Amino acid sequence: MAKARKDSRGRALRKGEVQRKSDGKYVYTYTDPLGRRKYIYSNDLMTLREKEKQLVRDQLDGLDTYVAGKATINEVFDRYMSIKYDIRETTRSGYIYTYDKYVRDTFGLKKIADIKYSDVYHFYNHLIAERGFSISTVDSVHCLLHPTFQLAVRDEIIRKNPSDGVMREINKRSGKNKGVRHALTIPEQRVFLDYIANHPVYNHWWTLFTVMLGTGMRIGEAIGLRWEDINIEERSISVNHSLVYFVSPETGKSIFKVSKPKTNAGIRQIPMLDVVKDAFELELEEQKEIGFNQSTIDGMTGFIFTNRNGYVHNPQTINQAIKRISGSYNAEELINAKREKREPVILPKFSCHHLRHTFCTRLCENETNLKVIQSVMGHRDIQTTLDIYADVTEEKKQETFILLSQKLDIF
C-alpha cells in the first residue's frame, strides 16, 4: 500500500497536491478540457483547497469547457438563460420550449466556436424548406440564438456573432415580411359568425367569437376576462390582465397563470359595441341557468367564458374549434353554391390572432386617428399600428379611385 504524502506540518496531501521544498508553497495540478496541464498555487493548504473546490464548481458549471471554446450551442444557451433574471416564468418557459423543440437535439449539439454565418443560414433554410416551418417560427428561433451567440462574443469565446444579418437575408430572399397576417374580409367575417349562430352544434361559440371580433382582444385577454372587468351599463371593458397556458418547468405539465401586461399600453378600456353588449348579456343569461365558471387561477375567479366542463378555455382548443367550424362551413358552402349556381364564399385558414387583426383592420377602415387605434388595440409600438393602417389605406385607395373614376366622367 502506497504511503500517503504529507506536508511539512504532517498533514496528508490529496491527489494532485504537493508542497514545494524550495519555498513551502502548495501546488495543485490538474488537466483542462484541452488536455493541457494547469496549476493552482497558494501559500496555505486550506486556501489551496478552497481554490480546488471553486475549480470543481466551475467545471460542473461547464465554465472550463466554455472558456476553452469547447462548449456546444446548447451549453451557451443554458448559460444565457441562467443570467436572464428579469423575465417572467411564462416567458422563460416559452423560450425553453421553443429552443428544445427546434434547436436542442440538432443544431444545438454543434460546438459554438465552429459555427459560421453559412451554418446558421443553412440551418434556418433547413427549417423552412425541409421541415416546412414558417418564417415567423424561424424568427422566434433566431430571437433565441442571436443573443446566445452574442453572449459568447461578449465573453470573448467567439470573435463575431455568426447569426448577424441572417434573418434579414432570409426575409429578403423569401420575399415575405415577418409576422404578416391577413384579416378576414367583411363577407368572410359575416358568414363565419352567421354560420356559428345558426348551427346546432357550434352555436355556443358565438358569444366568444363575437367578443373577439368586436374588441380585438388577444386570446389570453379574452379567456381571462372576468365579469367584474366589464360594465354593461356603461358599455366599457377593462383589459388589465391575461391568461397564459404554458408548460411548468417544475412539473412538466401545462398550467394556467395570470399574466399582467408588460407595458402600460396593454392596460386599456375598450368601448362596447352593440353586438358585443348583446353577446355578454346572452352569456350571462345562459350561465345563470347552467352555472358560472368554476376556475380559480392565481386567486382570480369569475371568468366569463367557459368550456363544456365549466372551466376557462384552452387557447389551443379555441384554434381547433375555428378549424372545425371553418371546415364544416366550407364543405356545406361548396354544395350550396353549386346548387344555387353562384360563387362560394370560402373561409381561409385562420387562427385566433387573425380575429384580432380583423378587428384592427375594420377599425383602421373607419378611424383615421392612429392614437385611438393604438390605444384600443393595446399596441406598445405605434409602428405596429402604422403597418396595419398602411395596408388598409392602400386597399382603400384602390377602392376610392374606382369610385372616383365612376363619378368623374371627364375622359
Image (cartoon, rainbow, N blue to C red):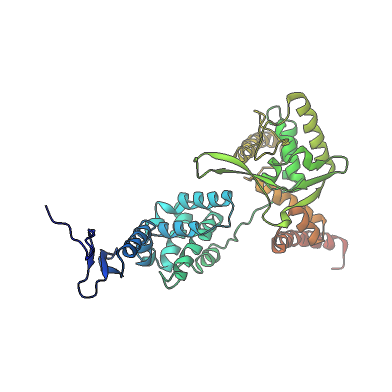
Which quarter of the figure has residue 286? top right
Residue at 85 percent across and 40 percent down: it is 232
Residue at 79 percent across and 56 percent down: it is 365
Of 3 and 384, the residue lying toward us:
3
Residue at the bottom extreme, as displayed: 22
Of 6 and 343, the residue lying toward us:
6
Of 156 and 118, the residue lying toward us:
156
Is 293 situated left or right of 143 in this image?
right
| Residue 273 drawn at (x, y percent) | 83, 44
Residue at the left extreme, as displayed: 1
Give the answer, above or below, for where 86 lies relative to 220: below
Residue at the front extreme, as displayed: 9
Would you say residue 69 is visible in this rendering?
A: yes
| Residue 218 drawn at (x, y percent) | 69, 48
Would you say residue 195 is visible in this rendering?
A: no
Give the answer, above or below, for where 16 lies relative to 357: below
Residue at 67 percent across and 29 percent down: it is 310
Is 110 situated left or right of 338 in this image?
left
The quadrant the C terminus occupies is: bottom right
Is 333 situated left or right of 118 in this image?
right
